[in-house]
Amino acid sequence: MKTAIIDYGAGNLFSVKNALDHLGAPCTVTKDAAELEKADRIILPGVGAFPDAMKALGETGLIDTIKEQTKKKPMLGICLGMQMLFDKSFEFGETDGLGLIPGTVELMTPPDLLIPQIGWNRLIYNGKCPLLEGLGDEPYVYFVHSYAAHCVPKNVAAYTDYGSNVPACVFSGNVYGCQFHPEKSGEKGLQILRNFLAL
Amino acid sequence: MLAKRIIPCLDVRNGKVVKGVNFEGIKDVGDPVECAAEYNRQGADEIVFYDITASHEGRGAMLNVVRETAKRVFVPLCVGGGIGSVEDFRETLRAGADKVSVNSQAVKNPKLISDAAEIFGSQCVVVGIDAKRDGKGSFTVYINGGRIDMGLDLGDWVKEIEERGAGEICLNSIDTDGTKAGFDIEMLNFVCSRVKIPVIASGGCGKLSDFSEVFEKTASSAALAASLFHFRELTVGEVKEHLKEKNIPVRSL
């Protein structure tokens, strides 16, 4: 039972590791393809801008390994790591993502609301997803983002209301993504990570 | 819709929690990591460490406190006090802080705000302000813990902070700080009407109704308190229960 946290220089990498350590879940921070192959599950963290992050991930040479491994084991993308799961993003031009979930990433334009969304907002469930079990009604989780996913409802496990329904938790097969930061969302966030570790 | 945040602040000197009353008469109480864990249990939405140490050794102790807290507390951590350079930002974020707060150094060198926002993102740059009525119907900005009047107009300063890319403003009113007579509604409205970034209210709260008042009468996104929580006069949970009764959205545990 080991989780590989992909190391491509993302800012929240050690917060994610702290949370897994706290949960007693063995994990390794790595940019080694062999470690991803050995691991039972993979986490793709992320903070910052999409093009820089895809470039940094590309430089690790792990993209093909990630695509291959997610056919066999669960992967969780967090924040920018979630956005990178989609086909492409329009942050600073147009950049291809990993293409693991169909959809695009675009700037949010809520009238009369601040961008970025920074703070605690509620999850509005959209059907059932094992990642969000045992959290109670519309739990608050911690968001920091300016861009949001655009995808079909069947890939959305939960939305959050920020001027409109914004995908907060997405999934497709073995691949899961959280736009919020479970590693900074208190007990509810830790429960989401426990759920991921139990997949 | 975003929840209104309740933020306990812990003043730390040489790795220990202290609390200044009107910035004077400091007394030493408690371990900051334990205090942060307790606030987390009570439902704090964010925790602020304010380092009042001026020495190099004190900074090291502060970073250890941040590292240890980040292993146990899984809500956003903000660290302020003695931050004067991009390098200070970097090492504080690396230790596990999610946000860094600058105050006097930003007044002396406003470029620090834009440099930090560019490198680390606006979301982690908080600018703290100590301000006071100038006796002529407006407000001026003070530095060094409220000791030095910079003759800087509060309205001009908050505009500049926003333009330089800060993510949030934490506004402490020297006029109400320590009085326990309520947050400075007038000063908060003055600032909230001039910027679009979130404003954190600080200074003056002494009772439950002060918290509902600040959210009912101002557009503040969060309320910060130190001694009130530190001396257990109120818990974060009690404040949130009160706000919930007043139909103000707060995160429940």
Image (cartoon, coloured by chain):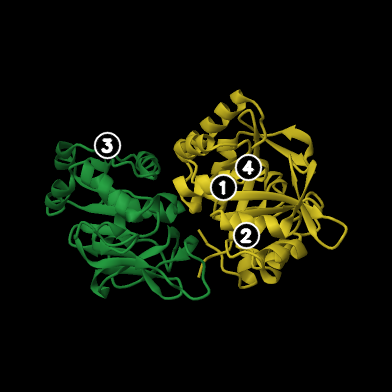
Question: What amino acid type is highlighted by mark number 4?
Answer: Asn
Q: Which mark is residue B113?
A: 1
Q: Where is residue B197 drawn, in percent x and y?
A: 57, 61
Q: Which residue is mark 4?
A: B109
Labels 3, 1: front one: 1
Neighbor class of circle 3 (other Cα within 10 Å; few <14, some 14-19, many 20+) is some
Q: Where is residue A175 drawn, in percent x and y?
A: 21, 58
Left/right of residue B180 with respect to residue A70 in the rendered view: right
Label 1 marks which chain's residue?
B
Question: What amino acid type is highlighted by mark number 2?
Answer: Val
For the residues marked 3 and 4, what is the alpha-carbon distance in whole angstroms? 40 Å
Labels 3, 4: front one: 4
In the picture, residue A97 is in which quadrant? bottom left
Q: Which residue is mark 2?
A: B199
In the picture, residue A147 is in which quadrant? bottom left
Q: Residue at x 54, y 43 (%)?
A: B37
- Same chain for mark 3 and mark 4? The answer is no
A76 in relation to B216, above or below:
above
Quadrant where the N terminus of chain A sits is top left
Neighbor class of circle 2 (other Cα within 10 Å; few <14, some 14-19, many 20+) is many
SS for tag 4?
A: loop
Q: Residue at x 27, y 36 (%)?
A: A28
Labels 2, 1: front one: 1
Which chain did the image draw in green? Answer: A
Q: Which mark is residue A28?
A: 3
Label 4 marks which chain's residue?
B
Label 2 marks which chain's residue?
B
